[in-house]
Image: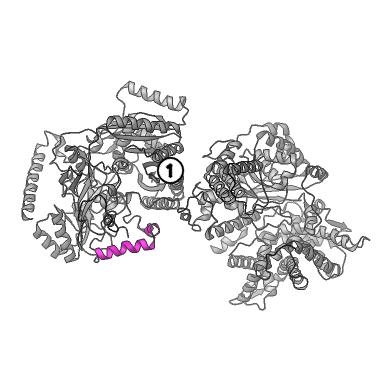
Amino acid sequence: GKTRALDPMLKKRDDFEDILEERRNSSDLKYALRCYTPVLYKGVTPCTSSMLKSMVLQSDQLHYVINQVSKETGKATDDIKEEASAILEEMAQCLQLSTVRFFAFTLSKAFKTLFRSICVNEDGIQRLQQAIQEHPVVLLPSHRSYMDFLLMSYILYTYDVALPVIAAGMDFMGMKFVGEMLRMSGAFFIRRSFGGDKLYWALFSEYVKTMLKNGFAPVEFFLEGTRSRTSKSLTPKLGLLNIVMDPFLKGEVFDVNVVPVSISYERVLEETLYARELLGIPKPKESTSGLFKARKILSEDYGSIHVYFGQPVSVRSLAQGKVNRCQFNLVPRHIPRRPSEDIASFVNDSAYRLVRAQEENMVLKPWVLVASLLLQYHHQNQAAGQKRGIALGELTAQAVWLRDLSRQYGAFLHWPDHIPPSEVVSSSLTLHRGLVRICEDKVQLAVEQGFSVAPEEELLSQAVILLSCASYRNQALHVFVRPALLALAIHTASSNQKQEVFNSFSFLRNMFSNEFILCPGATVQDFEEACYLLVKTGALQFTQQEVLVTERGHRTLAFLSTMLDPFLQGYQVVCRFLCEEATETLTEKQFIPAVRKFIKKLLLAGRLRYMEVLSSDLQKNSLAALLRLGAVRKMKGTPE
Amino acid sequence: MASNSSSDRQRIAQQRLRIIAGHLRAPVDSDSTILAAECKAQGSKTDVSSERKTVPRRRQEILKWNGWGYSDTRFLFNKKGQAEFTGKRYRLSGMIIPALQNWFEGTFGASVQHKSPAMPILTSSAVQPPTLNEAFVDELKSTGIPCSHDAEDRVFRGHGHCLHEVFALREGKVGRVPDIVVWPNCHNDVVKIVELACKHNVCLIPYGGGTSVSSALECPPEETRCIVSLDTSQMNRILWIDEKNLTAHVEAGIVGQELERLLNESGYCTGHEPDSMEFSSLGGWVATRASGMKKNIYGNIEDLVVHVKMVTPQGVIEKGCQCPRMSTGPDIHHFIMGSEGTLGVVTEVTMKIRPMPEYQKYGSVVFPNFEQGVACLREVAKQRCAPASIRLMDNEQFKFGHALKPQVSSIFTSFLDGLKKFYITKFKGFDPDRLCVATLLFEGDREKVLQHEKQVYDIAAKFGGLAAGEDNGQRGYMLTFVIAYLRDLGMDYYVIGESFETSVPWDRVLDICRNVKARIIQECKDKGVQFSPLSTCRVTQTYDAGACVYFYFAFNYRGLSDPVHVYEQVEHAAREEILANGGSLSHHHGVGKLRKEWMRETISDVGMGMLKSVKNYVDPKNIFGNRNLI
C-alpha cells in the first residue's frame, strides 16, 4: 500500500483539448458576442460591484478598525471612513461583460498569432464548474507570465465558467488605460506593501472575503505572489491564502474549494527579459507604450500552452484534525487577531501542498529535457576546454534516456511518441533557435565567444543565454529534486551508512528549502520517496545498513547531482563573499550589487564554473537560507 | 408520619377501585379506558376529574413499549396510500393527511411499498433474568413500597427515546435493563429506598417521564450490582398552593400536562411547557435543566424553581426557606439542576405559578428567506418584546409543515389557501424554495396581547415579513406534539431520524444553521447513505445574547448494513460541527451518556474537577450509578 502511494507513475491525468482550434475555424466576433451564462454558486447573493463596496464599508470588521484607528490617531471617524472609501475605490474591480468580450475578441487574434495551441483539460473545467456550484472557489494559477490572468479569464469565458476576480499588483495601475481595462475584466489592485496599515489590511481582507463568501465570483490570486523569473515555483506567500481560508475557519462558509491551476508555456514570452532582470539589467517599468513595443514579439512562434485545472481541494478536509475551530468561540469574530500558531502552520503547510499540486500538473515539453542535457554538456565541455557541440544523434539518445527516467519519476511529459525521437529533438531545437546553435550536426548553446566586446559585456550576454536555458531546466526540477538531493547526499556523506546518508540528505534539504518547494516537516517522507524512486529505477540498492550505488546507477546519480551543482556553487560563493568581503555596514540593499560584483570578478578570472550563480534569485535565496539557519544575522540599524 | 402514610394507603386503595371501575365501564365510554387526560395539544379544556392519573404504574397499558407516546395514537399509510393519524387525542387525530405520502416519498426516496415493520411484541426470552440483591429485595418488600421485576416493566425503564434505543426495541433487542422497578409514593418512601440502596450497595436510577434523548436512562453495561429503577410517577400530587406568594409545592413525579391541568383547575399555571410536557416530569425537568416553549414569559426551569428537595446518599438536601433570591454562596440549586440523576432523586419542588392568561393568540409571519427571519428574531430579542413563543422554521421545515396539513373540509378553505399562496409567491415575489415562516404565540390580557402583536408584526415588516395568519401558527405548535410520532412512521418505512439542539450567540446563528445542515448532508454522502437526507433546522428560543436552535435530521437507510451506526456517526459529526461553530453541547436536552465525551472541553478541567468532587462527597459509593454527565 505504502509503495503504491509513493509511485508517481500511478498518477492519473486528464486529456487536453486545444481551444484555439475552434477559434481558427469560426468567427472571433461571434465568439466574443456569444451568449455567456455561467453556473453560479448555489448560495450566491446577487449583487453589483458597487454593492460589494458598501457591504465592505458597512461591515463589523471595518467599523471596529475605523474606531480603533480613530482612537489611535485622533482623526475623526468620518474622515477615516472617507479615506477607506477612497482606498476601496482604488482597489476594487468592476467586472464588466463588455470588456471581457473585448478581450475575448482581441486575445483570440493575438493568441492565434503567438501560439500554436492552447490546451486545456476539459475534465478539470467540469470539476471546476461543479466546485463553483457547491462552495466558494479560489483559483490558484501558477505565475510565469503577465499573460497568466488574461489567459485564465479567456479560458473560463470560453468554457462558460464564472469569471474570477483577480488580485493584481499595483504596478499594473501605472499603465493608465490598461489598468482600467484590467479592472473591468475583474482585476482588483493591491499595494505591494502596506506593512502596519491596519485600515488598508482590513479593507483589503474584508473586500476579498466579502466577494468569496457571497459567491460573487471565484477569487483568483497567485500563491507565488509574483511571476517566477526562473520557472521554478516560488516559496508561497501566505497573506491572501490566510484571508481566503479565514471564512471557513471562522464558520462563515461551510467550505472553500481551492483549485490549483498549472499553466505551462512551451516558450515564455518574457524569456530573455527575465534573464536580464536576474542579472541586474534594469527592468523597464510597466507602461502602456512598453506594452505596445512588445508588439514585435507577435511575429514569433511561442509554441503551445498547456493549462491544467487540478483537483479542487476542500479547505475543510485540509483542516480536518489540524485546526481547532473552537478557538474563535471566545472572541467576536470581527475583531482582527493574529493567526494562532496552529493556524499559521496549517496555512503554511497547505500553501506548500498547493504549490506542489501546481508543480505536479505542469506539462513538460521535450525541450525541457534537452535544455537540461545541453546545460550539463556545456559545462563539462567548458571544463575540458572543448568548444565543439554534441552530435545530434547522441543528444537524441540521451534525451530518450532522460525521457524514460523522468517518466518513471512521474513527470507530466508531453513527448509525442508517434514521432521519431530525432525529429522531436530537432523540432524543439528549432522552436528555441535563439538559445542554440547547430552547425555540422553538432548542437551547442548559443553562447558567443571571442567577440571583441568588453569581457564583462560578453559575460553578461552569455549569462542571458545560460539563464534562459536554465529556466527551462528548472521546469523539470520538481520532478528530480528529491532524488537529486539524495544523489548529492550519497556523494557528500562520509560513508555509505544509511543514517549518514539520511543526515546528509536532511542537511542539504534544509539548506535548499528556500530554493525548492520542499514541504515543511516532510524530510522523512521526501527521503523515502527519493529512495523509492532510485531503487525502483535500479540505481540504488539498500542493505540492512548501507546504501549501494549499482553499476547502471552511476549515470543516473551523476546526472542528478550535476543538476544541483550550480545551486551548490551559488550557495558556496555567497558564503565566500560573506566571509571575505562582507563588513558590518553591509545593508540588505547593497547585498545583491556587492555579491554580483564579487561573482563577476571570479567568473572573469575563470574561477567559477556556473554563470547561473549570477542570478539574483539564487543569491537572495541563499542569503535567506543563511539567515534562517542562523549563520547570518540581520540587525536593525539607522540608514547611513 | 404514620397517619400520613396510612392516609396514603387509603387513597391508593380508592384509586385502584376507581381504575377498576373505569375498566368495567369501558365499552360504554371508550375514552375513559384511557387513563391519560386530554392532551395539551388538543388545546381545549374538558372537565376531567382531578383525581385521574396520567401515568399508571404499568405504563405499557397506555403507552407504546417500542415507540413514542400513546398506544392508540400513530401515523400510518392506509390502503389507499394516504397518511392517517389514529386515535382521538390530538386535533390531528382521525384525520387524513393527503400531502404526506408525496412529501415522504419525495424527500427520502422512500416508498410506502417498502415496509420495515417493528416486532409487535416483546419476547420475554430476549430479556436477561434480573440480578437481584435478595437482602435488598426482602427489606424493600417489608416497607410495602410497590416493586416489580416483571420483564415488561423492566424493559420499559431501560431506555429513553434516542434513535438507537427505539430502533433496538423495534428489532426486539434488549440490552442491560433494570433488575427491579420500584414505585415510591412520597418523599419518605424515597428516603427509605435510598437508605436501603446504600445499605445493600445497589445501583439506583431515577426514572421520571422516560423522555430522555441523551442515553441518560441506559443502564451502564459494566454495572454488576443490582440496578433499581426508581419510578417517580406515583409521586404526582400538588401538595399545596400558596396564592399569596404565587407558588405551588408539587411532588416531582408529576408530568407536565397533569401539573398544568391541576393548576388550571385553581385558575393557575406554571407556564412551563417543554415539547415533551405530555410525558416528561417535574423532577426530570429539574434534573436536566429543562426549557419551556413559553420561557419568554415564565422563564426556564431555573427561573421557576423556588425550592427543591432532593434525597441523596448523604441525606436530604434543601434550602431552609422559600426565598426569591439569596446571596449565600453558590446556589445549591445549581448542583441539583442538571445533575441528571447522578446525585440523588428530586422528590418535591416549589414552583412559581401565575394566574392563567386571559387571552392567547397564535400568529405567523412569512419571510422571503431564512436570513431575514433570523434578523427579525434578533431585532425582537434586542427590543425585548418576544412573544410567549417565537419560532422560525427554515424552508425545508416549512415544506414539511405544509405536507402535514390535514384534508381541508371546505372548498372555501382550499380556495383561500390557494389565494394566500398566490399572494405570497407571485404577488410578493417570495421564492417558494427560500421562504420561511415564524410561528408566534402571544399570551396575556387581551389589550396587551393585541398591542404586543402589532409591535412584533411591525418589526417583522421591516425585515420583509408578511403576516400569514393564526392557523399557520397554531398548526406549527400542534406539530411539536405530533412530530415525535412521525419518527415511528418513518421507521416503518426505512427512514430513521432524530432531532438535537444547541444554543448559540446571535452572530453565529446563521452560520451554525448552514454549516450543521451541510455537514449532515456531507456526512451522509460520505457514509454511503443512498438518498440525500432531510436536514433542517429551526430557531426555537430567543435570548438577549443568543438563540436556541433545533436540528432535525432523517434519512432513508435502505442499502445500509448498520444504519444506526451510520446515524450515530453523522450525529456525532454534527455535534462536532456545532461545537466548532460556537454552539453549546446542549441547550436543554442535557448530556447524559451520549454527549459526555465533550464535557471536558465544554466546562474545562477545573470545572470537571468541581463536579466530580461534588459527586464524590454526595455519593461516594456511586449508588446513583447511571454514569451520566461526568
Relative image position of residue B130 (x, y in whole percent): 19, 60
B621 falls in the magenta region:
yes
Q: Main secondary structure of the magenta part?
A: helix
Residue at far bottom of view: A495
Q: From what the image shows, is residue B206 above or below residue B23?
A: below
Question: Residue B196 occupies which quadrant of the picture?
Answer: bottom left
* Residue at 15%, 34% in the rendered image: B47
Magenta part of the protein: which range? Answer: B599-624
Indicate left or right for B3 with A411 as reference: left
Tell me if residue A37 can be seen: yes
Secondary structure found at label 1: loop
Relative image position of residue A469 (x, y in whole percent): 78, 58
Q: Quadrant of the C terminus of chain A?
A: bottom right
* Residue at 50%, 47% in the rendered image: A252
- Residue that carries the numbered disc 1 in the rendered image: B531
Relative image position of residue A401 (x, y in whole percent): 73, 62
Taking depth in this image into account, of A602 and B614 the one nearest to the observer is B614
